[in-house]
Image (cartoon, rainbow, N blue to C red):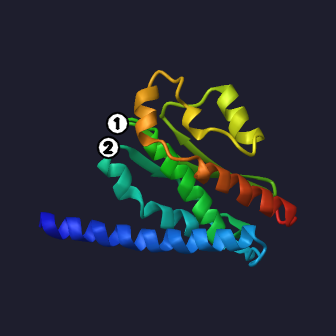
Amino acid sequence: AEIHTRLEYLSELVEKIDTYNDILGRWVKISQGIVSLNVENVPLLSIFDILKGNAHAFEMKNITLDIQPIDATVRCDRTMTLFMLNTLLDNARKYTPSGGKVSLSAQTEGEVVRIAVADTGYGLSPAEVDTINNHKVYDASSIGSTNAMGNDIKQNKGFGFGLMNCKHIITTLQKSGEW
């Protein structure tokens, strides 16, 4: 039974890697102007349901993943939005200690739908948030390093491309006039 569970998990990982490769390939083409965004009306619940498929990675780290359902339709590029939300959830998972919680929710405010990823993780200082939001290039290894859990954070560190990609997707959608 344990071997079957491991094979099932490996199969899920391979499928996710293929999906991420497709998404990243599309993102590169969009950023180079080769492919345009495919903006359409998308039920947000359909994206949230796909993201629930990542629950196993959270369970393995003893983190609760709470995805709150919402009955709203948004104008977005489904693939890029899925990539962006998955990146944010993955970051939250990486920097939330065992026993913590990561939440994905959305609220409608008139014509606007605000999506939020929240966690009980280590957090960032206001200066680090400013760096991520307002600098095109920054040293990702320095983000979170002054936190009380700096050593733990460094072990999970990437290169910061995920957040840079999310920022680029949002900027591209804003320039397209769809947001």
Q: State the count of labels.
A: 2
Element assignment for label 2: loop
The disc at residue 142 is none
Element assignment for label 1: loop
* Residue 123 x/y as whole percent: 55, 31
- Write down the residue under mark 2: 62
Whether residue 87 appears in this view of the structure is: yes
Name the kind of residue labelled 2 in the image: Asn
Quadrant of the image containing the N terminus: bottom left
Name the kind of residue labelled 1 in the image: Gly
**Please, is residue 167 above or below residue 135 in the view?**
below
Give the crowd class for mark 1: few <14, some 14-19, many >=20 residues within 10 Å.
few
* Residue 62 x/y as whole percent: 32, 43
**Please, is residue 9 above or below residue 170 in the view?**
below
Query: Along the horizontal axis of the image, is 44 left or right of 1?
Result: right
Q: Nearer the viewer, residue 116 or 177?
A: 177
* Residue 140 x/y as whole percent: 59, 40
Q: CA distance from mark 1 to mark 2?
A: 5 Å
**Please, is residue 126 above or below residue 154 in the view?**
above
Name the residue rendered at 49%, 67% in the picture: 50
Quadrant of residue 43 within the rendered picture: bottom right
Marks 1 and 2 close (CB-CB < 8 Å): yes
In the rendered structure, which disc, 1 or 2, sits on the residue that comes first in sequence? 2
Query: Along the horizontal axis of the image, is 152 left or right of 10?
Result: right
Name the residue rendered at 34%, 36% in the picture: 99
Query: Along the horizontal axis of the image, is 141 left or right of 165?
Result: left
Give the crowd class for mark 2: few <14, some 14-19, many >=20 residues within 10 Å.
some
- Write down the residue under mark 1: 99
Q: Nearer the viewer, residue 132 or 47?
A: 132
Q: Nearer the viewer, residue 65 or 37?
A: 37
Name the residue rendered at 71%, 52% in the picture: 167
* Residue 4 x/y as whole percent: 17, 70
